[in-house]
């Protein structure tokens, strides 16, 4: 027999999914598991369930008729109910919500027809009610505020937070903040969807979670990028899929620089625009378009034809915006816009 302290010291080193499976199989271990710190590499929260380190825990809506039991939606849509969920076979005809994971090793069910209640039940059964925040390296939110309420009995300590495209709505970030440990702020990294139109309309770009993030990463060129006040931003551009030409990117960057020069953007601000290309043509053309636009603002002694030399564009606020091009790893190219003091 292991003592309580010894068991805790062993559990803390177990794979998180193994710990969850053990606590579900052995109720006597549940309280020990919940009082032992839990660390997760990646946690994805969505309207179908949870994904913990690529391991799925998901909902199944089960429809029972007089002849057999069928999966109505979820991972096994349209299939007969597997033997792992046979608790449903004793139920009266109707629609039920069941749960299972992708190893088919743990199964349980509830007769609740309310999806919101079912999601909360799933979250609680898998992650449990813990007094100690769960440490998560990366949290991916692919849901809306209705299903996030299922996290109400949890606290998460998150290094990186990623929000998917359709989650951008009023109160979303405020709802997420309720479940994050106060020590999380400012977030080390926040990843936003590229479609920020609704975010700007709702005033969410001014939300404290976004403004205070140490690093803000965006996939795609957002329409309202000039309204982002976060100091360190990294924008990933897919020039091939988006069908953007170089003149489009150059025009967007010139408008952003103009805006910074007009308002006196805070010293220390750095926006990095990253794309992949086998040749340096795009990088050189973007740099040249910016140079030609601001050529008369750049000091004559600092004018150059070398695209690997930074452009230093002064403002009337005793600062200057540095525009530099450099090659990253592999085929990666980076254009940095950085505000520095004179």
Image (cartoon, rainbow, N blue to C red):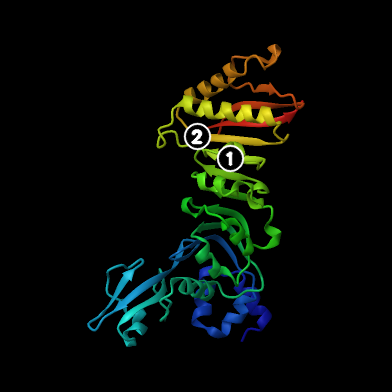
What's the mark number on residue 275?
2
- Label 2, residues with CA under 10 Å away: few <14, some 14-19, many ≥20: some
- Label 1, residues with CA under 10 Å away: few <14, some 14-19, many ≥20: some
Residue 148 vertical position relative to residue 269 in the rendered view, above or below: below
Question: In the picture provided, is 193 more to the left or to the right than 318?
Answer: left
Query: Quadrant location of residue 68?
Result: bottom left
Quick one: SS at disc 1?
strand
Q: Can I make out residue 324 in this image?
A: yes
Q: Position of residue 310 (x, y in %)?
A: 64, 23
Q: Out of 226 and 80, give the one closest to the viewer.
A: 226
Q: Position of residue 102 (x, y in %)?
A: 40, 68
Q: Position of residue 78 (x, y in %)?
A: 27, 69
How many marks overall? 2
Q: Can I make out residue 15 in this image?
A: no
User: Sequence order check: which comes first, mark 2 or mark 1?
Assistant: 1
Q: Position of residue 36 (x, y in %)?
A: 64, 74
What's the mark number on residue 252?
none
Quick one: SS at disc 2?
strand
Q: CA distance from mark 2 to mark 1?
A: 11 Å
For image coordinates 57% across by 82% down, the residue present is 29
Query: Quadrant location of residue 179?
Result: bottom right
Question: In the picture provided, is 248 more to the left or to the right than 41?
Answer: left
Most extreme residue toward the front is 201
Q: Out of 210 and 49, give the one closest to the viewer.
A: 210
Most extreme residue toward the top is 300
Most extreme residue toward the left is 67
Rendered-image quadrant of the C terminus: top right
Label 1 sits on residue: 234
For image coordinates 58% across by 40% down, the residue present is 234
For image coordinates 39% across by 75% down, the residue present is 97
Residue 86 vertical position relative to residue 207 in the rendered view, above or below: below
């Amino acid at each position: 027999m292991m003592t309580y302290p010894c068991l805790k010291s062993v559990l803390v080193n177990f794979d998180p999914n193994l710990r969850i499976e053990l606590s579900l199989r052995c109720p006597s271990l549940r309280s020990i598991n919940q009082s032992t710190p839990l660390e997760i590499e990646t946690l994805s929260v969505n309207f179908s369930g949870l994904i913990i380190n690529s391991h799925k825990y998901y909902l199944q809506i089960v429809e029972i008729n007089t002849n057999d039991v069928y999966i109505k939606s979820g991972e096994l849509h349209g299939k007969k109910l597997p033997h792992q969920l046979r608790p449903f076979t004793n139920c009266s005809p109707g629609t039920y919500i069941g749960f299972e994971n992708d190893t088919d090793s743990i199964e349980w069910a509830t007769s609740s027809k309310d999806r919101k209640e079912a999601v909360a039940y799933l979250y609680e059964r898998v992650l449990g009610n813990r007094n100690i925040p769960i440490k998560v390296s990366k949290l991916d939110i692919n849901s809306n505020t209705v299903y996030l309420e299922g996290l109400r009995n949890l606290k998460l300590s998150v290094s990186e937070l990623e929000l998917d495209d359709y989650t951008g709505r009023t109160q979303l970030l405020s709802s997420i903040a309720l479940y994050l440990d106060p020590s999380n702020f400012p977030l080390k990294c926040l990843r936003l969807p590229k479609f920020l139109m609704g975010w700007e309309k709702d005033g969410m770009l001014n939300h404290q979670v976004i403004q205070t993030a140490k690093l803000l990463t965006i996939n795609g060129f957002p329409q309202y990028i000039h309204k982002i006040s976060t100091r360190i931003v990294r924008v990933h551009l897919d020039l091939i899929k988006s069908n953007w030409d170089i003149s489009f990117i150059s025009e967007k960057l010139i408008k952003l620089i103009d805006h910074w020069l007009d308002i006196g953007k805070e010293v220390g601000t750095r926006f990095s625009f990253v794309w992949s290309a086998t040749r340096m043509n795009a990088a050189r053309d973007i740099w040249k378009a910016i140079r030609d636009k601001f050529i008369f603002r750049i000091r004559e002694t600092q004018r150059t034809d070398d695209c690997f030399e930074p452009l230093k564009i002064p403002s009337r606020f005793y600062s200057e915006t540095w525009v530099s091009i450099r090659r990253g790893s592999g085929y990666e190219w980076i254009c940095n816009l950085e505000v520095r003091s004179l």
